[in-house]
Structures are given as C-alpha cells and as structure tokens.
Amino acid sequence: MGPWKHQRTIRAIEAGTRNLRLFQGQLVPGLLQTPEYASAVFRLAPALPEETLVKTVAARLERQAALHRPGHSFHFLICEHVLRWEIGTPAVMARQLDRLLSLSRLSDIRLGVVPQAGRKPDFPMTCFSLHDDRLVIVETFHAEVTTRDPRDLRLYAETFERFAAIALYGDGMKALVESVRDGFLLQQE
C-alpha cells in the first residue's frame, strides 16, 4: 500500500490509543525520530525512491502530533545499542539523542533505556507496541503482525514489564544518553 500510507495507518491506530507502550531493540521509535534520522532510516536498503522517501518521512513526522494530545501516555523502552547504532552521520545521531532527551522531559512520556551491561530478563527478538490493553503490533523483518488475543497481550505486557524493570530512567537514563551523544559529538570534530 506504500510506506507513507502505512505511516498513516499507524497514525490512526496511535490516535485511538490512550496508553502506548513500545519496546524497540532496532531503531529509535518513529514517534521520537528527527527528520534527519527518519530520512537515514528510509535510505537504508532497500532505499526508497526520493519522492516516496519525502512522503514517508513527512507521514512519520505527522504521527508525532500524538505525543502532545492531552490524556495520552507513552512509555518507550529502547535498548542501549539502538542509541549507538549509526543510522546516519555522527551529527544526525547527536541531534537524534538530543531529541530523546528533550522529549523525555514531557510529562506524558516515560523513556527508559535498557542498558547493555548487566543480566537481561530476555532478548530483544522483536520490536513491539502495546496499544492500551486491546492490541499488540509486532514488527518483523518484512512485515507487522497484529494480535488482539488476550494471551498474546498478556505475554507482550509481561515481556515489556521485565525489560522496564531493568531499564534506566530519569538521571541514569539522561547520563547514558548524554554520554553516547557526546561520543558522536567528538566524532564530528
């Protein structure tokens, strides 16, 4: 259906979600991406044609309006290696990490980083989002799988909570993100 149309479909799902929990072990979540980072993502193989890329990035950025809707809450879990994975230039990465820090200050956003160090409760096999207690979207390499089955919802909610229990929040999260960002800033010099 076209990647920009898919972004609009996800936007509609997110608009109807009051409480979004998102686990990401591959990329910075689309709702938190800068335009430059999103462009770099869609330039990865297989790269989108320029016209499609522009439409897709614009549609992804339009989704971010959800972050400012009253009565909606967001809990993002991002694996530390995602912060270090160079999707774009060091400048693009540094700006993206600054954006994470900025968004983490919003009252309806809770941002946790699962640190590389220490024992883990599981491994990040897939990225997934829980939309209230009604829907899970699981990202695979080539597609997304959705489920509303209560057993599946419980499985993903429990997995999310296991990772949330070891994630860094607040000052610990900020210190880690700033450290990675500062490494990218040094690469620019």
Image (cartoon, rainbow, N blue to C red):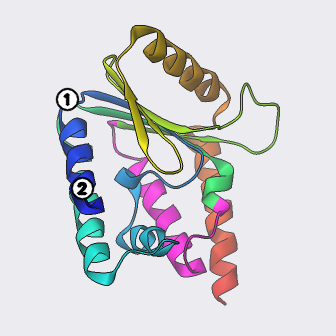
Residue 96 in the image: x percent, y percent? Answer: 48, 66
- Residue at figure coordinates x 51%, y 22% from the top left: 156
Count neighbours of disc 1 (C-alpha within 10 A) and say few if under 14, some if 14 to 19, many if 20 or more. Answer: few
| Quadrant housing residue 134 | top left
In the picture, the disc for residue 137 is none
Q: Residue furthest bottom?
A: 189
Residue 118 as seen in the image, left or right of residue 75: right
Given residues 173 and 133, the one toward you in this image is 133
Residue drawn at point x = 64 percent, y = 37 percent: 125
State the extent of the magenta-drawn residues as a range. 84-108
| Prevailing secondary structure of the magenta residues | helix
- Rounded to the nearest angstrom, the CA distance separating label 1 from label 2 is 31 Å
Tag in front: 1 or 2: 2
Between 131 and 165, the one nearer to me in the picture: 131
Q: Tell me the kind of residue under disc 1.
A: Gly
Q: Residue at x 59, y 22 (%)?
A: 159
Residue 22: give x, y in percent of width and height.
45, 36
Question: Of the residues under marks 1 and 2, which one precedes in the sequence?
Answer: 2
Tell me the tag on residue 1. 2
State the residue at coordinates (48%, 55%). 101
Amino acid type of the residue tagged 2 in the rendering: Met
* For residue 175, above or below residue 57: above
Instruction: Indicate the quadrant where residue 86 lies.
Output: bottom right
**What percent of the width, then of the height, locates residue 6?**
26, 52
SS assignment at label 2: loop
> Would you say residue 61 is visible in this rendering?
no
Residue at the disc numbered 1: 71
Q: Quadrant of residue 56?
A: bottom left
- Residue 141, position in %: x, y? 53, 50
Looking at the picture, tell me which residue is in the foreground, 169 or 119: 119
Q: Which quadrant holds the N terminus? A: bottom left
